[in-house]
Amino acid sequence: MENFRFYSPTEFIFGRDTQKDCGKALKRYGAAKVMIVYGSDRIKASGLLKEIEDSIAAEGIEFCEYGGIKPNPTAENVYGGIARAVSEGVNFLLAVGGGSPIDAAKGIAMGAVYSGDFWDFYCGKATPAAALPVGVVLTIPAAGSEGSGNSVITNEKTHQKISVRYPFMLRPLFAIMNPELTYSLPWFQTACGIVDMMAHIFERYFSNTPQTQLVDAYSEAIMRDIADQALTLKLDGENYAARADIMWAGTLAHNGLCGVGKEEDWASHRLEHEISAFYDVAHGAGLAVIIPAWMKLCAERNPDKLWRFAINVMSVNPAGKETMEIIDEGISELKNFYHDLGLTTSLRELVGKEPDIDMMVESLHRNMGDTLGCYVPLSMDDCREIYKIALEG
Amino acid sequence: MENFRFYSPTEFIFGRDTQKDCGKALKRYGAAKVMIVYGSDRIKASGLLKEIEDSIAAEGIEFCEYGGIKPNPTAENVYGGIARAVSEGVNFLLAVGGGSPIDAAKGIAMGAVYSGDFWDFYCGKATPAAALPVGVVLTIPAAGSEGSGNSVITNEKTHQKISVRYPFMLRPLFAIMNPELTYSLPWFQTACGIVDMMAHIFERYFSNTPQTQLVDAYSEAIMRDIADQALTLKLDGENYAARADIMWAGTLAHNGLCGVGKEEDWASHRLEHEISAFYDVAHGAGLAVIIPAWMKLCAERNPDKLWRFAINVMSVNPAGKETMEIIDEGISELKNFYHDLGLTTSLRELVGKEPDIDMMVESLHRNMGDTLGCYVPLSMDDCREIYKIALEG
């Protein structure tokens, strides 16, 4: 285990009806004027926005709205939000939704108190010195952004999708998490969220750091539960216990707990970011395509953790089997799981045409340099190979 | 799962040599003058105190010392610390050691900014409105106080040992955790710490709250790892990986993560507190006596979670066995584990004479009222029965 710092100061307010406490939480954290950041009008139609606004008004806090955040939130979303936050003079941002409005709110939070271009913080030209405080009402468990210091923004002009991590600056002060708010999610979004949160654990689990038994053991327990509850939800989308476990697992998957003391990988995420930067696909759906292909390429070069994953998470019975057989079975089981969720594992099927692999690899090279990840350090040729393996799925 | 709030804002600074960053951490958190709270002179002899003081001085922060905190920290320790902190005008407390100096520092933190008697906060006469900030350098993994909002103080005058929990007030701002600092712990203290941290999970795991699959699964993973690493440490006390897992597990066992959404029990802890309030025994050694007896009494009345514990944590093979047989085997395995650690499970052997059970039950009744716990709500007759079962062990 390597030295680490773990800092997760977000207050998680979890359970039924907790959105009604939104105003009280904002008051406790010193909000005077709030900008509510959200995506589609679904939260208006469902009555959630009104419920939240009522609870804010009840505390005598002023607020304005900033909607229209896209599913892969764009730099344009952030620029617009910064302008609005500054002109309205807000001192607090409340993101309502999933990872997209939360990530956009984090970008706005940094940009609103910075004299330069907020994109400087994403392209590596500057480090933020301050940010507006952010609170969250979570409606889509997936990105884990409610408990992380991360933000991913897509710059449509430059075709870049860049993730930043400022754990001491960007963690939300509070996150309100009512599993009932996720009952009405379309199944596809539920499924993509499940793939994404499991992937957040994969990126930390597949590591060469030795002697990480405790963190690996609880990571495996969380992964097994996600897989189990996912199948329950497929049959019964209003199963509170399953919705609650998935929601809490999504937070634990990405608040750092599963990565303490370990070198992290993140190659799969970066390989996927190129897909969703160029094609109109959901991040989770892209991961379902990339991850089995990534595992396939890594299997020969670094089998250890894939072997352990197959047995301890995918429940492959190792009796009488060779290592590679066990790993292959683990990958097959994972693919079956994705198929059970209704997702494809074929890149060609996902993007609906022959994808331009050269273009994606070139962009990856431009964004990430010569190598990617660390469980198996990938050359650009390896990345090309992974996209090719993923073609058929 | 019940609604919950989870708030663990402590910054954990974990790994080799991290005690050298103590001054920097204090600086970041605004310390101007620090009182270092500790127990025995062991930390002087080992050179740790000097290392810490050098790092504080290097940041230009003033400090004073307050040593002599007892293993079960007393109200006298706290009164003395309050007087010292006020007369020195400190604005920060740094506890160095295990749960005892940390718990004492928390008592001092509340008392130093309160015009009344700090004991008001423990006996339920008042709720704290403020407290000095507390930082920690942990040297004994056990109590989990480095990440909790709890403090346990013994009032020797009234023979009361009372635990309070103020999760939004008493959590340390940071905890420095270097597993190497625990290499030199006597084995008995290591063993008692291991029993204590497992018990912190037991108190949350044995619960009647339905549908808590995720939290139970990761709790079981942590308990299994504690048991496994404990046996490694018995053979090799300087095994870094095992020391690191035990240290991190001790924090996770008590920072609230294993109790989210669950009704908690705490009967075993309260039964034990009477033993260490009247007899000179270590808390962990008392728990090793109480817990198997508590399990024995609960087995018939509420077998479900004990059955699950036997199989999932103590690795009892359930094939062809009745429920009670499985539970009995689980309890036996737990006793064997305590014996392997070198601890007795006999109350008589622990206190070295015939214990005064009536006196302990009377005191328990005075402190806790008519019933105790919730997994099986215990009458005072049940408590007497548990002490009796524990006599032989």
Image (cartoon, coloured by chain):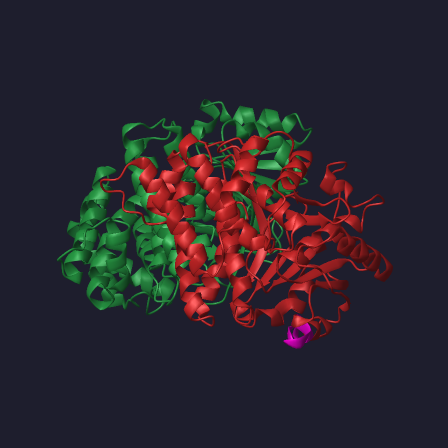
Chain colours: A red, B green
Nearest to the observer: residue A324 or residue B301: A324
Q: Position of residue B333 (x, y in %)?
A: 20, 47
Nearest to the observer: residue B50 or residue B154: B50
Instruction: Tell whether B180 sits left or right of A95.
Output: left
Instruction: Tell whether A204 sits left or right of A104.
Output: left
Q: Position of residue A171 (x, y in %)?
A: 64, 50
What secondary structure do most residues of the magenta stretch adopt? Answer: helix
Q: Is residue A46 magenta?
A: yes
Q: What is the magenta range?
A: A43-51
Instruction: Tell whether A198 sits left or right of A28.
Output: left
| Residue at the outermost front position | A354
Q: Is residue A293 above or below residue B385?
A: above
Q: Is residue B57 above or below residue A171?
A: above
Q: Position of residue A386 (x, y in %)?
A: 52, 39
Q: Is residue A174 visible?
A: yes
Q: Is residue A326 above or below residue A15?
A: above
Q: Position of residue B332 (x, y in %)?
A: 18, 49
